[in-house]
């Protein structure tokens, strides 16, 4: 893939911190699990909201309560997902810098001999 093709790709960014996210097909398995879990929780929240609209009385309050729990859980899941992706990115950058230092040290040793 050349530079032009890379530039033409749409870049997905995190809603909270703005760093670039890989496509879901290339994402780590843990990220896929988080995305699926968040989508499932959003589906449950939608079902609870619809139930809240059509049911009157105490069950309606129960659905509203469940809806609030599900939405807050989804938001927490998104925040944790963002945190773990960012932490993984920082660890990867640290490893890359360590490898670059090792390469520079080995080339300096070779030049010195």
Image: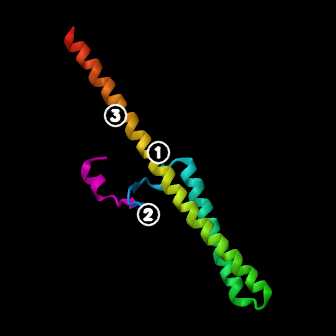
- The reply, left or right, for residue 111 in relation to residue 29 is left
Foreground of the two, 28 or 81: 81
Answer whether labels 3 and 1 touch (C-beta < 8 Å). Answer: no
Residue 3 part of the magenta segment: yes
Q: Secondary structure at mark 3?
A: helix
Q: Which residues are magenta?
A: 1-12
Identify the residue position indicated by label 1 in the image: 88
Residue 16 circle label: 2
Residue at (44% x, 63% y) in the render = 16
**Residue 36: x, y in percent?**
60, 60
Callout 1 crowding tier (Cα within 10 Å): few <14, some 14–19, many ≥20: few
Q: CA distance from mark 3 to mark 2?
A: 26 Å
* Image spot of residue 53 (x, y percent): 68, 88
Q: Residues within 10 Å of mark 3 (few under 14, many from 20)?
A: few
- At 68% from the left edge and 77% from the top edge, which residue is drawn? 47
* Residue, disc 3: 97
First reached walking from the N terminus: tag 3 or tag 2: 2
Q: Can you give x and y, in whole percent of width and height, for residue 100 in the image?
A: 31, 30
Q: Please determine whether, in this image, residue 87 is positioned above or below residue 38.
A: above
Q: Earlier in the sequence, mark 2 or mark 1?
A: 2
Q: Quadrant of residue 99?
A: top left
Q: Earlier in the sequence, mark 3 or mark 1?
A: 1
Say which residue appears at 58% left-offset and 60% top-offset.
Answer: 77
| Residue 4 part of the magenta segment | yes
């Amino acid at each position: 893939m050349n530079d032009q093709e890379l530039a033409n790709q749409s870049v997905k960014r995190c809603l909270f911190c703005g760093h670039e996210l890989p496509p879901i097909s290339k994402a780590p398995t843990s990220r896929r699990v988080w995305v699926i879990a968040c989508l499932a929780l959003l589906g449950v929240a939608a079902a609870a909201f619809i139930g809240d609209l059509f049911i009157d009385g105490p069950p309606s309050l129960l659905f509203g309560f469940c809806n609030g729990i599900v939405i807050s859980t989804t938001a927490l899941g998104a925040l944790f997902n963002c945190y773990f992706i960012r932490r993984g990115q920082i660890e990867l950058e640290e490893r890359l810098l360590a490898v670059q230092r090792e390469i520079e040290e080995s080339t300096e040793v070779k030049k010195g001999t």
